[in-house]
Image (cartoon, rainbow, N blue to C red):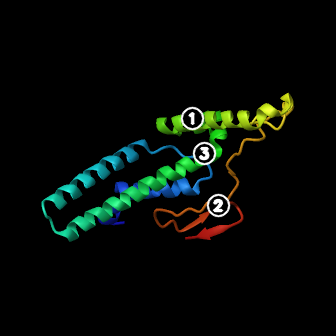
């Protein structure tokens, strides 16, 4: 890989695209990319200011358009990354809350979102359904008080296939003792 390809592969936009793809492909929530998101937000603010300044100063509309296109691309990637994470949090909030390792993968804002969502759902379930059920069935986590596990908590399917792409040519490689793969 030459220097240009190496440089392109490590830009924040490419790193954000990789983080978004990884988050979409992973069955459970991954570690929040704090520094990358912060740098991307700063870059968005800088490019927005640049576009405004260029527009005010009458810079060539094509140049402004190129900056705006780059801004739109970064905004799309950041929004998609954050949206994917929020969808996972909404879907698996009870599972994430009870697993310390998963909970620690969330940003502070995501933890606050998850806490508020859990409180809202618990309150809604209690007011609409659970208060009308017999005591044995008044849990939103278990089917009944005799259940030993939280059998009503959705969990990600960790035994599913995940697609991956190597960053560089690997040649032949072996996943198990029976099959040899060529890339």
Which label lies toward us, 3 or 2? 3
Q: Decide if residue 66 is on the left or right side of residue 85.
A: left
**Location of mark 1 (residue):** 116
- The quadrant in which the N terminus is found is bottom left
Q: What element carries label 3?
A: helix
Foreground: 127 or 75?
A: 127
Mark 2 or mark 1, earlier in chain: 1
Q: How many marks?
A: 3
Is 41 above or below relative to 109?
Answer: below
Where's residue 173, x and y in %?
59, 64
- The quadrant in which the C terminus is found is bottom right
10 Å crowding of disc 1: few (<14), some (14-19), many (20+): few
Foreground: 143 or 33?
A: 143
**Location of mark 3 (residue):** 90
Which label lies toward us, 2 or 1? 1
Is 181 above or below relative to 77?
Answer: below
Q: Decide if residue 178 is on the left or right side of residue 163.
A: right
Mark 3 or mark 1, earlier in chain: 3
Q: How far apart are marks 3 and 1 (CA)?
A: 11 Å
Q: Decide if residue 53 is on the left or right side of residue 20.
A: left
**Location of mark 2 (residue):** 175
Foreground: 130 or 176?
A: 130
Which label lies toward us, 3 or 1? 1
């Amino acid at each position: 890989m030459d220097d240009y390809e190496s440089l392109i592969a490590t830009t924040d936009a490419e790193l954000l695209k990789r983080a978004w793809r990884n988050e979409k492909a992973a069955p459970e929530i991954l570690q929040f990319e704090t520094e990358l998101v912060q740098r991307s937000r700063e870059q968005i603010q800088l490019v927005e200011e640049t576009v405004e300044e260029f527009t005010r100063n009458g810079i060539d509309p094509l140049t402004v358009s190129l900056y705006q296109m780059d801004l739109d691309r970064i905004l799309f990637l950041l929004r998609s990354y954050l949206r994917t994470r929020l969808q996972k949090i909404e879907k698996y909030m009870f599972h994430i809350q009870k697993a310390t390792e998963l909970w620690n993968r969330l940003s502070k804002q995501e933890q606050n979102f998850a806490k508020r969502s859990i409180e809202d759902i618990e309150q809604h379930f209690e007011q609409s359904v659970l208060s009308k059920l017999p005591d044995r069935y008044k849990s939103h986590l278990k089917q009944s008080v005799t259940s030993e596990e939280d059998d009503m908590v959705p969990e990600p399917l960790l035994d599913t296939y995940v697609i991956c792409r190597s960053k560089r040519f690997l040649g032949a490689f072996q996943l198990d003792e029976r099959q040899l793969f060529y890339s």
